[in-house]
Amino acid sequence: MLERIIPIHPDNDFSRTERIMQGYEAIFILNPETGEEDQTGLIDKYKTLVGSNGGQVVHHTTWGRRKLAYEVKKHDFGFYHLFYMDRTPDALRALENSFRIDDNVIKWMSVSVEDVEKEHADFERLKTEGSLAQKLSEG
Amino acid sequence: MAKGKGGGRRRGLGNRIIIPKRKTSELNRLDEIPYKDVELLKNYLTERGRILPRRITGNDASTQRMLRQAIKRARNIGLLSFADGYVAQD
């Protein structure tokens, strides 16, 4: 259980008591040359892979085509995708192993998160409302 | 400097010890620092992409640790450059 107060999000429900889902956030960058259909195909493949190892991809989000801060495997751009998963170590291991083999995935990273739903909501907020930097300076 | 009979002690304002006002950072209010928010992280990097010290930003110790973690993650996944810090999208 995790109950923390985040003052900059006044809409946060301070009184919630339900169990939070701990899990992983897997962020991976797909080769910029892969087409739309190929990407959805890959995403489905990874989702079923996680499922077959007892895990569950709770949310899948894309960050679209982004310029990379540095060259990765000779690429300047990449398609960012994020998986929010429940905490099943075997599923994450299987996913990481296939990322390692797959040439379409040029870079990836997985992070352990305390609250899958919150992380997902925070990221959606970042995408729609922009950086926290401005909100902080406004007070 | 010539020392007077009074042991060199000066009277008045010069005798005061100046305690600098502690800087505070807005980041201190955050519960966690999202590594994906590069627009936020870039404010805590030098032009060459190095992490600014607490002395300058006014982050408290735990905030600085979270910031360090976030910046390292952002670098790892290609959101920030190791050498040039923030790289703008086109």
Image (cartoon, helix red, strand yellow):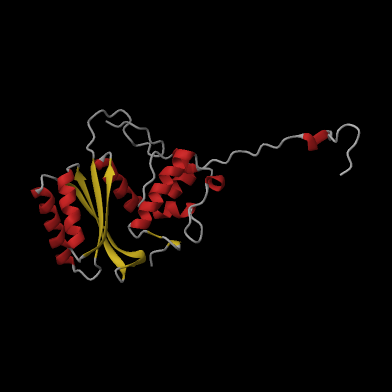
A91 or A30: nearer the viewer:
A91
Q: Residue at x 43, y 43 (%)?
A: B65
Give residue A39's quadrant in the image: bottom left
Residue A95 x/y as whole percent: 17, 53
Residue A92 x/y as whole percent: 18, 49
Compared across the picture, whether A107 is left or right of A131 comes to left
Compared across the picture, whether B39 is left or right of A101 comes to right
Q: Residue at x 24, y 51 (%)?
A: A26
Compared across the picture, whether B73 is left or right of A31 comes to right
Looking at the image, the residue that sits furthest to the right is B5
Task: Name the image quarter holding the N terminus of chain A.
Answer: top left
Compared across the picture, whether B29 is left or right of A66 comes to right
Q: Is residue A78 visible?
A: yes
Figure disc tally: 0
Q: In this rendering, is residue A68 above or below A85?
A: below
Q: In this rendering, is residue A56 above or below A75?
A: above
B6 or A112: nearer the viewer:
B6
Residue A86 x/y as whole percent: 19, 42
Q: Residue at x 49, y 42 (%)?
A: B26
Q: Is residue A130 visible?
A: no
